[in-house]
Image (spheres, helix red, strand yellow):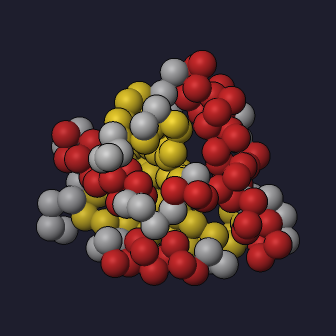
Amino acid sequence: MQSVETIRRAALADADAIAALVNEAYTPYIARIGKKPAPMLDDYRQVVADFETFILTRDSELAGVLVMSLEDDELLLVNVAVLPRCKGQGIGKLLMRFCEDFAQGARCQAIRLYTHELMTENIEIYKKLGYRETHRATENGFARVFMRKAMRGD
């Protein structure tokens, strides 16, 4: 039987489930980084209220979350997370495609993102999706790699 994926805007009622998904998705990185990754520290009620937050359900189960912020003519990809048991099933790709479609619909010039420098597998995924590293910096105690993807051929 074919799975059914749906992406919809998150509601405040989804905040606890989003927080649980994010915690499960980022827990494996704690040992590597030496502390909880930044997305685990967020208040997801505030995130849902303040950002463009979408959830992906697969057969009615929350499987992924996407958090974005429109900033002038660019879109900041704040967070993309997939439930660990759903990794490798194309959910991350669906969320990234949704992010790009959202950016194009909003007439954004580019999508920016950052990730921890020790999340090397994520950096490689973003590179394969066309993101280019712009710089590295430490912010809020996290060593970050900043990346950007032009939407209209800059």
Q: Is residue 142 above or below residue 61?
A: below
Q: In this rendering, does residue 50 appear at all? A: no
- Which residue is at 45% across, 80% downward? 124
Observer-nearest of 145 and 82: 82
Q: Is residue 151 above or below residue 13?
A: below
Q: Which quarter of the image is occupied by the C terminus?
A: bottom left
Observer-nearest of 94 and 109: 94
* Residue 7, percent from left and from top: 36, 36
- Which residue is at 62% across, 74% downward? 119
* Residue 52, percent from left and from top: 44, 34
- Which residue is at 60% across, 19% downward? 13
* Residue 3, percent from left and from top: 35, 45
Q: Is residue 40 above or below residue 57?
A: below
* Residue 88, percent from left and from top: 46, 67
Q: Is residue 94 left or right of residue 35?
A: left
Residue 126 image-quadrant placement: bottom left
Observer-nearest of 90 and 15: 90
